[in-house]
């Protein structure tokens, strides 16, 4: 018996609506960036970010008036000035958008052995392009399975988990839902630790002077988040232990601190800005800072560390302040992302 054409388990009737199927997607996701540095662009971005219940765990009745009547009145202009210092003028966008796009493009090239069955894209948790819009775009390109990769080496509910929230919220609206995987953190992955160590050692070798102290500055979270069970601090501590082992630097030379605290409550300590000032006042003249918790340079690394904390160090008697770039879209950085992606795509390609 001859099998008629266009039959079998994958055949579609002639009048079937056109639809793409059979592909696998990878979506890289980073925190986000405003569309511009003006007041209203900053306000929209900050409102979305600071309205996230995982980011600000304060009862809505208390937080709503603080956010809308105080913070969103004063903070957009100040943050706009900060972003303006690091803005990518050529592309008219924040550096985080530039770098994340480049990471996705390079990753696509590295995964080309999978053929056109694999599609790599990128998104921002807050701002544009949104997670929902890129998941929908991947679905329209025929991606029935999508790996979402939060670009955070250490897990925190306010970062990794909120990416997962947004991805699953988007999936709720889809008639034809893709299968979703969320990549786990890689705080102790040997490839990540090796990349950090190589990057740090290369920056030290490039200098004509020897840093007396190296600070590894991680983004902070409120202490009560950790007390409630968030593993973020533990992930940072393990990264530090492994990085010290890989570089041979002791705790007195390579120290962990936490930056970007917000509000009056206690956050993870020691604080980066206070440590930077104390080191300078104690007589340390040459300081280096590395930011292992960030996969790409952004406001928190380029402006907060590179400008604000540099000024704190110099104003208190320091002389040389060096900032190690994030792994970004370098070969070392892409080695880490590719390792994670290939591992988490197991069974799909």
Image (cartoon, grey):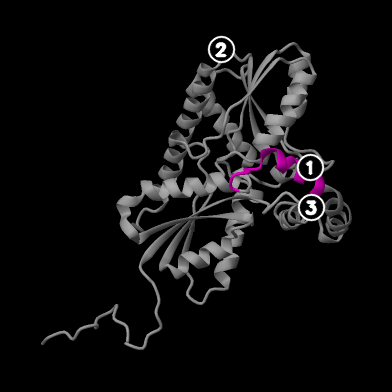
Magenta region: which residues? 76-91
Crowding around mark 2 (Cα neighbors within 10 Å: few <14, some 14 to 19, many 20+) is few
Residue at image coords 57%, 44%: 152
The residue tagged with tag 2: helix, strand or loop?
loop
Give the quarter of the image for residue 252.
Answer: top right
Residue at image coords 41%, 44%: 338
- N-terminal-most mark, 3 or 2: 3
**What is the C-alpha distance between the residues marked 2 and 1?**
36 Å
Residue 39 disc label: 3
Give the quarter of the image for residue 261.
Answer: top right
Residue 82 part of the magenta segment = yes
- Residue 254 seen from this side: yes
The quarter in which the N terminus is drawn is: bottom left
- N-terminal-most mark, 2 or 1: 2
- N-terminal-most mark, 1 or 3: 3
The image shows residue 339 at horizontal and vertical percentages of 41, 43
Q: Is residue 217 left or right of residue 325?
A: right
Q: Answer above or below: position of 99 versus 315.
A: below
Instruction: Report the residue marked by disc 2.
Output: 208
């Amino acid at each position: 018996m001859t099998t008629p054409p266009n039959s079998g388990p994958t055949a579609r009737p002639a009048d079937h609506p056109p639809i793409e199927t059979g592909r696998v997607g990878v979506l890289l996701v980073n925190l986000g960036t405003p569309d511009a540095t003006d007041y209203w662009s900053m306000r929209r971005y900050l409102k979305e970010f600071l309205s996230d219940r995982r980011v600000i765990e304060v009862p809505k009745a208390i937080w709503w008036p603080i956010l809308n009547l105080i913070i969103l009145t004063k903070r957009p202009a100040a943050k706009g000035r900060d972003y303006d210092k690091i803005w990518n003028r050529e592309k008219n966008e924040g550096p985080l958008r530039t770098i994340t796009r480049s990471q996705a493009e390079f990753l696509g090239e590295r995964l080309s052995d999978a053929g056109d069955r694999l599609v790599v894209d990128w998104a921002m948790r807050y701002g544009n392009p949104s997670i929902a819009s890129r998941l929908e775009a991947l679905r329209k390109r025929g991606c029935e399975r999508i790996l979402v990769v939060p670009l955070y080496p250490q897990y925190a509910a306010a970062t990794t988990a909120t990416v997962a929230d947004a991805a699953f919220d988007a999936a709720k609206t889809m008639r034809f839902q893709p299968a979703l995987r969320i990549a786990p953190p890689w705080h102790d992955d040997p490839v990540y630790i090796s990349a950090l160590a190589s990057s740090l050692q290369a920056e030290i070798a490039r200098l004509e002077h020897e840093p007396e102290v190296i600070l590894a500055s991680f983004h902070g979270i409120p202490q009560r988040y950790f007390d409630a069970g968030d593993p973020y601090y533990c992930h940072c501590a393990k990264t530090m232990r492994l990085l010290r082992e890989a570089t041979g630097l002791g705790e007195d030379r390579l120290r962990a601190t936490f930056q970007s605290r917000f509000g009056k409550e206690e956050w993870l300590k020691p604080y980066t800005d206070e440590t930077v000032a104390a080191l300078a006042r104690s007589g340390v003249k040459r300081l280096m800072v590395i930011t292992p918790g960030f996969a790409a340079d952004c406001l928190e690394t380029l402006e907060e560390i590179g400008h604000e904390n540099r000024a704190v160090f110099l104003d208190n008697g320091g002389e040389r302040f060096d900032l190690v770039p994030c792994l970004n879209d370098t070969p070392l950085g892409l080695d880490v992302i590719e390792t994670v992606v290939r591992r988490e795509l197991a069974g799909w390609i």
